[in-house]
Image (spheres, rainbow, N blue to C red):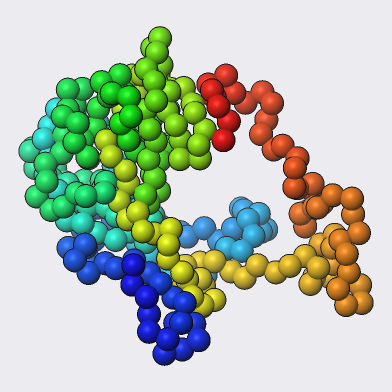
Amino acid sequence: MKKRKPTTPSNRQTAHVTYRGVLTTNEPLKSLTTGFSRGSGRNAFGRITTQHKGGGHKRSYREIDFRFDKINIPAKVETVEYDPNRSGFIGVVCYADGERRYNLLPQGIKVGDALIVAEDAPLKPGNRTILRKLPVGTFVYNIELQPNGGARVARSAGNYAEVVANDRGQSHLKMPSGEIRKVSENVWASIGAVSNEEYKHRNIGKAGRNRWLGIRPTVRGGAKNPVDHPYGGGEGRQGRGTKRPKTKYGKVTGGRKTRSPKKYSNNLIVTRR
């Protein structure tokens, strides 16, 4: 981590990840980038459906390979790059047949390292194999939930799941949240943990930097008008005046369970988070 010198009040606490010596290029591979419309938190009618989103710096989208359908073809890492659309580092991977793709990189990998997607792949960070081939205690990321369904779980910076058991055609994974969940032992997963593990220690430092990231201000309910929030209005500060805490839409929060009691994956969860 790099801490800024206190030349301004905001720089006094700003801390960010050191990219020097880690990233190898500043420009993405043009053939693997596209333009895209940033989420502004609004639906097709222009109404805000997700609060505190909008603005932000313009970005280009890097097309990341989460399907990993080039099986038994060795590859080599060519770059380590920053991606504004995700927290982990990405890199261009060149396969033996000449095709290049962006991959989400694990911790400890560097330019020139070899990777492979195969059932008998060596137990090495970045390699990808099926869960039944992995011993208990292995850290994995980019995990599928359905065989050949593409990576879905443990894709954020520093994240990983741990294989805690293989039993009766299913693997038990300890998720980043602490939940222990069953998945098919035939799903694919990458060995290791996602890169940029120091990401969680960063300190934004000032409101303007959040605006660059597309995050708008969060306003307390009690500071709003009665028409805008159940806590709004009154002379000076008032108590919330309701039995249970609520959102601006009147939905109860703070203790009410939001998970559907008939969710398809309820029987796959061994231990809740």
Q: Is residue 194 above or below residue 178?
A: below
Q: Is residue 37 above or below residue 171?
A: below
Figure disc tally: 0
Query: Within the image, what quadrant is residue 145 found in?
Result: top left
In the rendered structure, the answer to whether residue 257 lies left or right of residue 224 reads left
In the rendered structure, the answer to whether residue 244 lies left or right of residue 129 reads right
Query: Considering depth in this image, is 28 or 1 the residue closer to the camera?
Result: 1
In the rendering, at what x and y percent does residue 218 appear? 65, 67
* x 21%, y 50%: residue: 108
Query: Within the image, what quadrant is residue 260 found in?
Result: top right
Q: Is residue 194 above or below residue 190?
A: below
* x 21%, y 63%: residue: 23
If the image is split into quadrants, where does the C terminus sit? top right
Query: Considering depth in this image, is 203 or 93 the residue closer to the camera?
Result: 203
In the rendering, at what x and y percent does residue 236 appear? 88, 77
In the rendering, at what x and y percent does residue 62 appear? 31, 54
* x 16%, y 29%: residue: 122
Query: Within the image, what quadrant is residue 137 found in?
Result: top left
Residue 148 visible: no
Residue ranking furthest to the front: 137
Q: Is residue 144 above or below residue 42?
A: above
In the rendered structure, the answer to whether residue 41 lies left or right of residue 138 reads right
In the rendering, at what x and y percent does residue 169 appear? 38, 12
In the rendered structure, the answer to whether residue 174 lies left or right of residue 189 reads right
If the image is split into quadrants, where does the N terminus sit? bottom left
